[in-house]
Image (cartoon, rainbow, N blue to C red):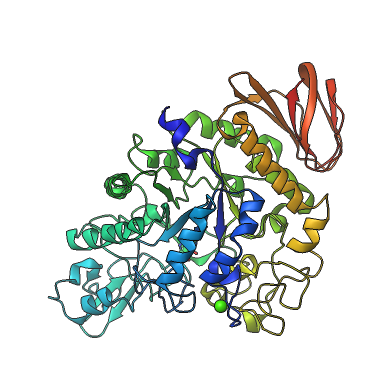
């Protein structure tokens, strides 16, 4: 067998869990690891292959876990290392893989490494972070900005009179991977978890890890609209991310450690245009799956999505395996972005395009964005830049399990850390399981179909010429030929089918049940998978 057939992550489906919001097991209103373990059977039944858990490490939670103060332990709020071991064992018993988040670009300012580093200019860990003297006017060493408030990306530390760099909050100092000591320590963190049985990492903002050696100023963004755009967009990030030649060396360091263990996967959080994104595969020696976020960022119409998919397919290097993402903890829910009707079309596409899909918890229910009153805002981004829709709390609301007071996320009577989305009493796992036409049952059926048909989980992709508002493509494997047809409009559209008789294997809205020949008249917001009879 070739690698292609044996790598589980090529034909598997990844499901992202935001641990604060999946299942609370001890009544404090915050999800935890024992809660996830309790819900594994739900995930097996849903039909996914791997869970990726957003950071569950000790953390002051300035950025909800993306500020790690110890990379080799579990935050007491989420449980213990024993709970993590139990989760991994329970997942593996059920055939599920476990992927953790690795946060290499920055630690928490409470990490002992940073505490040491800031203590004196000659501390052995000084160079584990970026320390620089003030500019001639006493200000920051360059014009780089911090991601959430658009203020300087540097903070002056009184102890030593130097500034430290932080691409995100000041509580998230950037780590210096060009320092061999830091590098060795972080690569050992990976080994620590791989030895405990973890199957891979999603690597946080991995394309930002290497910075221009001279820390040159970033150019101004001529398209910036003050007050209308994220303040951080004032500059073009020419020197603070991507484009540094040794970013690929960084990728290879991580890959070499992953290769020390069998069947481990690296997924990179790489938010770049397709042409740049595909360079992160390297020669099959860098990131296995550089996240492709373009289903989220491309305008939702047939033309644009099709040309994105075709361009991506044509840019992929040899041996590279594609992937798609529809939602995550940083983006408004798919239902909020494109509406409920099209979210079914989107789920069908995510699970039938060529490549590994990553699903976001709750999207299988069609969960909407939550409504967060000002006094319940948690996300620092919303606190710094209120009212621009940048806050990420709406897509992080608790999972909706049933119609009880806390939706089965917490015990009734407990106030969850974020308010439940308004429709939790009618839209939840229990009610949708009972409804044959629900989003949940559609998602389950799609996952089953994908698993059953090699054309879907391993086959080739080719676009099919079709009509306006329709994106149609082939998925083929050996003798198996499947046709996927998606209608991006809310009105009926017709297309000419290739010769022969075509049986619907699945229909997102259930409007197509009979075999068709020659012409297909597809209802609005409908998407189908067809098989040659
Ligand atoms: C990307 C993560 O997905 C986001 O949630 C976080 O705030 C930043 N990286 C900083 O770690
Ligand atoms: Ca809890």
* Horizontal and vertical percent position of residue 12: 54, 43
Residue 308 lies, in percent from the top left, at: 58, 36
Residue shown at the point (53%, 72%) measured from the top left: 32
Q: Position of residue 280 (x, y in %)?
A: 38, 42
How far across and how far down the image is residue 400, in percent?
Answer: 70, 67
Observer-nearest residue: 330 or 499?
A: 499
Residue occupying image coordinates x 57% and y 73% = 31
Residue shown at the point (38%, 71%) measured from the top left? 68
Figure quadrant of the C terminus:
top right
Compared across the picture, whether 432 is left or right of 38 comes to right
**514 lies left or right of 40:** right
Residue found farthest to the front: 93
The relative height of residue 346 versus residue 152 in the rendered view (above or below) is above
* Quadrant in the picture for residue 81: bottom left
Quarter of the view holding residue 429: bottom right
Q: Nearer the viewer, residue 229 or 261?
A: 261
Quadrant (top left/top right/bottom left/bottom right) for the N terminus: top left
Is residue 300 shown to the viewer in this render? no
Left or right of 486, for residue 388: left
Between residues 326 and 140, which one lies in front from this camera angle? 326
Please state if 363 lies on the left or on the right of 106 as rendered: right
Would residue 418 be visible to someone looking at this image? yes
Q: Residue furthest left?
A: 122
Depicted 295 relative to depicted 469: above or below: below
Above or below, comparing residue 129 to residue 252 in the picture: below
Query: Dividing the picture into quarters, in which one does residue 514 lie?
Result: top right
């Amino acid at each position: 067998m070739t690698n292609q057939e044996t790598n589980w992550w090529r034909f598997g489906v990844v499901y992202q869990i935001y641990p604060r919001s999946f299942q609370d097991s001890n009544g404090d209103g915050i999800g935890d690891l024992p809660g996830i373990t309790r819900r594994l059977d739900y995930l097996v039944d849903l039909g996914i292959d791997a869970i990726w858990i957003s950071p569950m490490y000790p953390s002051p939670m300035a950025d909800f876990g993306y500020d790690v103060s110890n990379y080799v332990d579990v935050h007491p709020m989420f449980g213990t290392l024993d709970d993590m071991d139990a989760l991994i064992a329970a997942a593996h018993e059920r055939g599920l893989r476990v992927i953790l988040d690795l946060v290499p670009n920055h630690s928490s300012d409470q990490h002992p490494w940073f505490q040491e580093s800031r203590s004196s200019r000659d501390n052995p860990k000084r160079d584990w972070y970026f320390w620089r003297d003030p500019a001639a006017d006493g200000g920051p060493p360059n014009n780089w900005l911090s991601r959430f408030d658009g203020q300087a990306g540097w903070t002056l530390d009184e102890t030593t009179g130097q500034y430290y760099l932080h691409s995100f909050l000041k509580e998230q100092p950037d780590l210096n991977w060009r320092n061999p000591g830091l590098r060795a320590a972080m690569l050992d963190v990976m080994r620590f978890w791989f030895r405990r049985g973890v199957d891979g990492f999603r690597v946080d903002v991995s394309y930002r890890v290497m910075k221009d050696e001279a820390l040159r100023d970033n150019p101004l963004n001529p398209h910036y609209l003050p007050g209308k755009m994220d303040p951080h967009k004032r500059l073009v990030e020419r020197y603070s991310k991507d484009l540094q030649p040794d970013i690929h060396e960084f990728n290879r360091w991580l890959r070499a450690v992953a290769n020390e263990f069998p069947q481990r996967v690296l997924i990179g959080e790489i938010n770049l245009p397709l042409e740049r994104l595909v360079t992160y595969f390297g020669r099959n020696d860098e990131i296995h799956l550089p996240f492709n976020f373009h289903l989220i960022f491309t305008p939702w119409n047939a033309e644009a999505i099709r040309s994105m998919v075709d361009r991506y397919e044509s840019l992929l290097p040899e041996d590279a395996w594609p992937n798609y993402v529809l939602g995550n903890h940083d983006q408004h829910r798919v239902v909020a972005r494109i509406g409920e009707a099209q979210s079914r079309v989107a789920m069908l596409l995510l699970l039938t395009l060529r490549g590994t899909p990553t699903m976001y918890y709750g999207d299988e229910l069609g969960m909407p964005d939550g409504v967060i009153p000002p006094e319940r805002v948690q996300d620092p981004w919303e606190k710094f830049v209120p009212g621009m829709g940048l806050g990420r709390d709406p897509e992080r609301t608790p999972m909706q399990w049933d119609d009880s007071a806390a939706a089965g996320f917490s015990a009734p009577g407990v106030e969850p850390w974020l308010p439940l989305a308004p429709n939790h009493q009618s839209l939840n796992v229990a009610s949708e399981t009972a409804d044959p036409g629900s989003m949940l049952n559609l998602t389950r059926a799609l996952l089953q179909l994908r698993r059953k048909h090699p054309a879907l989980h391993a086959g080739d992709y080719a676009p099919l010429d079709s009509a306006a508002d329709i994106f149609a493509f082939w998925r083929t494997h050996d003798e198996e030929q499947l046709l996927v047809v998606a209608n991006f409009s809310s009105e009926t559209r017709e297309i000419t089918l290739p010769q022969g008789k075509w049986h619907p294997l699945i229909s997102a809205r259930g409007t197509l049940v009979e075999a068709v020949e020659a012409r297909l008249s597809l209802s609005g917001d409908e998407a189908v998978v067809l098989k040659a009879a």
